[in-house]
Image: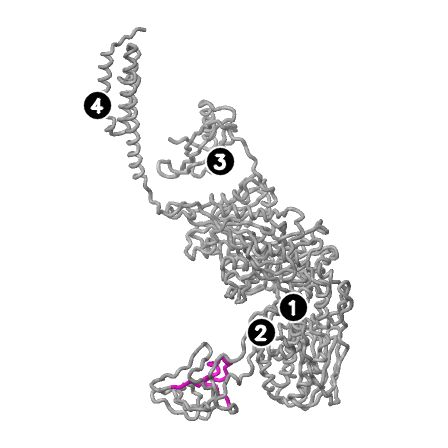
Amino acid sequence: MKISSNWLKEHLDHGLSVEELSVQMLRLGFEIAGVEHHGPTFSGVVVGKVLQKDKHPNADKLAVCTVDDGSQKWNVVCGAPNVAAGQTIAFARIGAVLPGNFKIEGRKLRGVESQGMICSRAELGLPKDVDGIWVMGEGPALGTDVGSLLGPADDVLEVEITSNRPDCLSHRGLARELAAALNKPLKPISSSLAETLSKTVSVSVEDAAACPFYGARLIEGIKVTDSPAWLKARLESIGLRPVNNVVDVTNFVLHDVGQPLHAFDADKLNSGKIIVRRSKSGEKFLALDHKEYVLPENLLVIADAERPVALAGVMGGELSSVDAATSRVVLEGAYFAPAEVRRSSQKTRLRSDSSYRFERGADPEAARTAAARATALIVQLAGGSAAKPAETAAPAAKAAPIKSSAARINAILGAEFGADEIVGALKRIAAEFTGDGASFVFTPPSWRRDLATANDLAEEAGRFLGYDRVPYRLSPLSPKAATTTPAASAARRARLHLASLGFSESYNYDLLSEKAQAAARLSSDNQPRVDNPLSEDWAVLRSSLLPGLLKNAQHNLSRGADAVRLFEVGKVYAQKDGAVTEQWRVSGILLGPVLDARWQAARAPRAGFPDAKAAVEALLSGLGALSWAKPGEGAAGKRVCDPLFHPSNSLRALLDGTPVATVGWLHPRAARAFDLDREGAVLFEANLETIASKPAPRVKFREFSPLPVSRRDLALVVDKTLAYGRVEETVRSCRIDELQELTLFDVYEGKNLPEGKKSLAIRLTFGRSDRTLLDSEVAAFVAKIVAALTEKAGAVLRG
Amino acid sequence: MEPTTNRAAWDQAYARVESALKAADVAQCADLLKLEEVRVRFLGRKSELTELLKSLKDLPIEDKKEAGPKAQALKSAFEAQLEARKAALEEAGDAAALAQDAIDLTLPSIRPARGRLHPLTTTLEGIADIFQRMGYSWAEGPHAEDDYHNFTALNMPEDHPARDSQDTFYLSGVKRLLRTHTSNVQIRELEKPGAKDKPLRVVCPGRVFRHEQIDATHSAVFHQVEGLVVDRNVGLADLKGHLQAFLEELLGSETKTRFRPSYFPFTEPSTEVDVKCFFCPGTGCPSCKHTGWIEILGAGVVNPKVLSMSGWDPEKWSGFAFGIGVERVAMLLHGVRDLRDFYINDLRFLKQFDEDLV
């Protein structure tokens, strides 16, 4: 809200500079979003007269003017098309300084000496009116300083008023607040009104709860004209456009004391009646914003005998508006229930200064006095005579008194303010205050509907006495060591595991388009949808983290990255039987060569399935028995976003038999959809909540034998199609307790091997903890293993 | 035993060895291999010098007295020569090897692929970690929330104007909305079975949603860290103490703060907390919007209505709550100017956040 410092002084001699004013407001809880300085930002510009205009000898578009500044005549070259002899103009003499520190000097323009400048409004930093120079009109004496004609300088503050303080949405409201803070008196508002007209308006209110007070007053014989300069200046200072003397008065009173008012053209009201009623469904209303609104039923409207003429508390109607031909007006001063106005404003998406105040809560007792004041001003500015108002109901009941004590206030603040200080501060804002620090009763004024509890009073005391005087206290002491949730610790572990494997962390939005889901081969059928999405791109809550990561991978590749390794920890959603379920997941994507290989990059291997498998193993290590199954191969439970994965080159990880993650190649169709079809992307997604449900791994140290072990390497030639898993299974099936470790250390296909064969090189490590093995024992183990491999895996020892 | 060797014969042998040693010329020996040959030739078990020393025992006593030291001196001198030559040869050899070993030290380092945590993770966990050290337990709540926990229970009934500032995504057909703040966790924690009538101290980090067009300073998805303390006799002073301690930990012990009144429906009194701008010396700059202060969080004494709505007796219990915008803190700490950068996941962005893992 814009607050003019000069206007504020009409209500309170605050004696503060604009800087001090800003600090004071902030201490009271009102942020200052900005300060505008109004007034001349130039010097040395005087009123002049163009005596003569001649053509410039060397330029078609320039003129040479003779300007009289009251004491001397000057030759001035001017390029404005509207300059003419006889005009009164703003003349910047040599030595003048225009906005932007632009100094006027004498100089030659196309060979002709120019001794100053004829200014446009824009060049003086004033709002522009016409193209070209500012033609000022007769009046001011030649040589008068133009700056002095602009009225007194002013500072206009953009004040942010929190939604609990509608009483501060006016100059008087803020002045009242400052008066309490500075302990200075508010100036009285003088207004005298003669109610000479003996006519009344017919007013009926059909819903007194929605409109506890309605006043309407007839004013006749008025002449609608422009407002006087002082009123225009007031409104313009806070950025309002003057309309006419009647409308301007209602706007002035709104910004002066915070009470919204409305003036109807009485002759445009059918039967001259005012009915406050509920709208009927489909009723049409042409508002002052020139738009027609088809109203839903049950909004509170002001109607004449036939149709709505105003949306109560929100906006008046075009068809009953005051214009130049108006001679009789009905001035409305009312109090509407906040919820009503809020609902009307929301349903019609119509907002106004009026609705802003009503929906936050206007002062129920201000309508009558504000309307009287506006009436007096209208009669003063537009003539005519006013009748007594027709009023319905009584103003709403007084706010409930609050019982409290200084000790209670200090307890809420944790402060040690003196009882006198607290009582003093509260007295200044109370409608009634009885008692003392030990026990008092505070009755809030009608405009402070936000005050209802001791906590509210504590805030008031704190604001006026200073939050900075409340001490810093570090109690209570923590009752126990802080705990964390399983999901949070699982997420932390997952992040550290993946970062250490070279994955960087992504953050994607939870909302995406159905199209993006479909591109990743994911159905949106069971997904929660947003009723009011920002756009189609934000319509569905995600069912997997992978579409986001695919988009991230594509983004990075298109911007020159040659390798991508990203992960995300986040929630996925599903909707079932009218309920939304949420689940934490952790997912990752890898493509391109191993990162950070730098000058060895040419020889760095590309990320493949085993790398993704490593990530999943890291996430699951130590949590239980890990096994792998092909999706659909008999494992119980649901598939984890399987459609996104390559049907054969993907595996499901099971933890103690429960599916927990899927890892594999990207399905070629999804790869094409994300423009990743040449990249060989591998991905994984794991259910973080299953991981979190397992007790956090605690390493149990196992003794290792100090005795030497025996190693044997075997190169096995097997069918190309044989899965390595078969080899491992076969070796394990020999049940040799002394076999401590089996590792695969090479897979080779190609030269020196028969067609359709590959070579698997394995290392067997044997040992016992009580003694060293004999060579003969080791040889027997190896023989047993080789025999089994030959029999069950068709392996032949190589070389 | 009688001496078997006479002095003359021994002297002859000595002269032979001495000249042989001289001829061997240890000081000129070309390499360590040759040097070893010479050593074995003269000091080996059957070598002349060893024999010479052995034969001392066969000399008469008087001759021994003179010949003994003489032979020992010959041996010692030879050994000294050997040692000196060996050292010289080794040194020369090392120098040659060292010269040959020289690698290109200017080649860039090679390190295992290393990932980075997202700056919002480090910021969020960094904030939560400070509070956890102050005894706040980690708590979470649902993203898809009902109207009651997101608004009504926080003293924002249906027609409350404060709802305007929190434009909301509503979900179709399930009477759920996407939570507009982490304050819903306050209510969830107050309602938790077994929580009632025990001191409560939680920090609730998480994701929140607002129906806002996305631009450099607005996001429809962002993160907050909520805090709630409920205990006996808790007041604004405790809030100030805890948040001052937090901010000093987050931003440094010199951090100056300003607590100014504000309004949130679920706290009363309410406050917004500013920290002295750390980009300028308080003279004003674009980061502090030329005010010298940066708004960092909102907080307040828990509104007694909130406590009683959740079944706590506000006569016995009181508390304070606060909410911190994670993106805002991350932007301030890292100088990120456009909120959207956090959600594009460009590796050129992510890789810059090379801080210690939390």
Badge 4 and badge 2 in a common chain: no
**C-alpha separation, residue under disc 4 versus residue under disc 2:** 109 Å
Residue carrying label 1: A163
Q: Nearer the viewer, residue B309 or B221?
A: B309
Q: Which residue is mark 2?
A: A17
**C-alpha gap between disc 4 and disc 3:** 73 Å
Residue contact between numbered discs 4 and 2, judged by CB atoms under 8 Å: no
Cα separation, mark 4 vs mark 1, equals 111 Å
Left or right of A511 on screen, residue A444: right
Host chain of mark 3: A
**First in residue order: circle 1 vs circle 3:** 1
Quadrant of image for the N terminus of chain B? top left
Mark positioned earlier in the residue sequence (2 or 1): 2
Tag 1 subunit: A
- Secondary structure type for disc 1: loop
What scheme was used to colour the molecule? Answer: one colour
| In the rendered image, residues at marks 2 and 1 fall on the same chain | yes
Instruction: Say which residue label 4 marks.
Output: B23
Viewer-proximal residue, A185 or A168?
A185
Name above or below for residue B35 compared with residue A641.
above
Task: Give me the residue at 74% from left, 55% from top.
Answer: B316
Which quarter of the picture shows residue A10? bottom right
Magenta includes A116? yes
